[in-house]
Image (tube, helix red, strand yellow):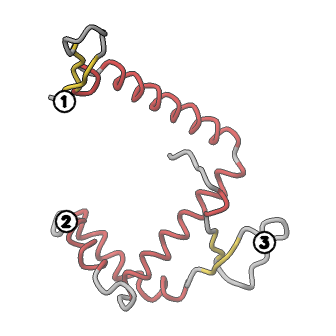
Amino acid sequence: MPRIKGWKHLTFYESSPQDTFEYLEALFRDVIKTTLLADHLPDMLRVVLSINAGRIKPSAILKRLGSHSRRNLLYQAFRDLGRAVCTVFLLEYLSDPEMRSMIFRATNRSESLNHFTKQASFSKGGTIAEKDGSSSARLSNTTI
């Protein structure tokens, strides 16, 4: 689960304009097309089952759905499903301090590991320092 930065750029989607949330109304900026999801649910399930069965690779599906995406209704249905899942995750993230703490700890741990591997890498990430032979002991970098 990612650490979430830049809250002001995130978009929350509501399920229908008739739903009202007294304290959260200002967060929602757009509406998910639930009729599109309902109409294309069998097609979406067929795609998921094909991927699980190994009949088609996810990259092939992404190529097909990515082309002419504005006109492809199946692409739009998957996009709205992703928006709904993202909105639910963000609302859970906001409401659960324990989950935020767990994400914060895990992210700090992985960032510390990345920092350590960068520091412990051989020869400063492929750069060798050597003296250039002048009277001053300057170091010039040579890349491997």
Residue behind mark 3: 25
- Tell me what residue is drawn at x 62 percent, y 55 percent: 6
Q: Is residue 7 left or right of residue 111?
A: right
Q: Is residue 16 left or right of residue 47?
A: right
- Tell me what residue is drawn at x 58 percent, y 57 percent: 89
- Tell me what residue is drawn at x 48 percent, y 73 percent: 81
> Residue 143 bears which disc, if any?
1
SS assignment at label 2: loop
Quarter-of-image position of residue 98: top right
Residue behind mark 2: 57
Amino acid on which disc 2 is placed = Lys
Quarter-of-image position of residue 39: bottom left
Quarter-of-image position of residue 130: top left
Instruction: Choose between 3 and 135: the one closer to the eye.
Output: 135
Front of the two marks 1 and 2: 1
Q: Earlier in the sequence, mark 2 or mark 3?
A: 3
- Tell me what residue is drawn at x 49 percent, y 28 percent: 109
Instruction: Choose between 84 and 2: the one closer to the eye.
Output: 2
